[in-house]
Image (spheres, rainbow, N blue to C red):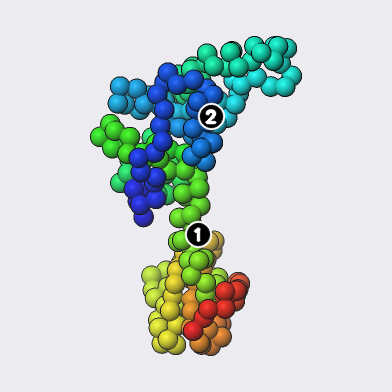
Amino acid sequence: MLVRDRMTRNPVSVAPEMVVPEALELLKRNEIRRLPVIGNGKLIGMVTQMDLLRVSPTPATSLAVWEIPALVAKIRVKEVMSRKVITIGPDQPIEDAALLMREKMIGGLPVVDKGELVGIITETDIFDAFVDVLGVKQGGTRITLEVADRIGSLAEVTGLAKDLGINILSLVTLPGEGGWARATFRVKGRRIAELVEEMKSRGLKILHVFPDTNKRSS
């Protein structure tokens, strides 16, 4: 899965001269939290809802009520935006985007291709991808087990599922310790209980079995 598969194309953007109230209204109208700033056709910054709210007067301000709108209306996006923008390319793996956002502690990345803004990918997009990779929306029984960290271990388990006529909807593995790895399967079929027992008989340690809460198993 690549960034281009999950990014929002043609994202809403703003000009650096836009005033703060207009930028806030744009965020509200589009139900988003960040805006790329485009100047002369190029990405020159990013501004977030928090950036804009930070320069808006609070109830504790000593300004007179009639002074507040006039003051805020003079503040431009270019005065509060982040100029050192971290970007990512559309053909990079989505996990690279997740790692970059985690390391830099940011909630979104402009996607730039050949110097042009082509999209934006956010933490919500990453969460949605995670849900899809785990096959949550497809239902099925979720089985987590430990398998030997060696060639052929997963093939043995998937072969058992095939022999019992069980469909594997998703499969995710995580490295473990002591020569073992953790594998999580989401499966559908009539003979899941037999699959679990067969795994146990072969010395595999079953950690969790969560039944299909959607009750859509065949």
The location of residue 135, given as percent across then percent down, is 48, 66
Q: Earlier in the sequence, mark 1 or mark 2?
A: 2
Crowd tier of the residue under label 1, counting other residues whose Cα lies within 10 Å: few below 14, some 14–19, many 20 or above: few
Q: Secondary structure at mark 2?
A: helix
Identify the disc placed on residue 88.
none
Which residue is drawn at the image coordinates 45% and 69% (left, top)? Answer: 170
Rounded to the nearest whole Å, what is the CA distance between mark 1 and mark 2?
30 Å
Identify the disc placed on residue 131.
1
Horizontal relation, residue 198 to residue 14: left or right: right
Q: Is residue 31 above or below residue 65?
A: below
Which residue is drawn at the image coordinates 42% and 43% (left, top)? Answer: 121
Can residue 23 be seen?
yes
The residue at the far left in this view is 114
Horizontal relation, residue 73 to residue 129: left or right: right
Crowd tier of the residue under label 2, counting other residues whose Cα lies within 10 Å: few below 14, some 14–19, many 20 or above: many
Q: Secondary structure at mark 1?
A: helix
Identify the disc placed on residue 24.
2
Residues at circles 1 and 2 in contact by the CB criterion of under 8 Å: no
Which mark's residue is nearer the viewer, 1 or 2? Answer: 2
Q: Is residue 193 above or below residue 150?
A: below
Which residue is drawn at the image coordinates 49% and 32% (left, top)? Answer: 26
The amino acid on which the numbered mark 1 sits, given as a three-letter code, is Val
Which residue is drawn at the image coordinates 50% and 59% (left, top)? Answer: 131
Give the quadrant of residue 38: top left
The location of residue 84, given as percent across then percent down, is 43, 25
Q: Is residue 84 above or below residue 217?
A: above
Query: For this rendering, which residue is in front, 104 or 136?
Result: 136
The amino acid on which the numbered mark 2 sits, given as a three-letter code, is Leu
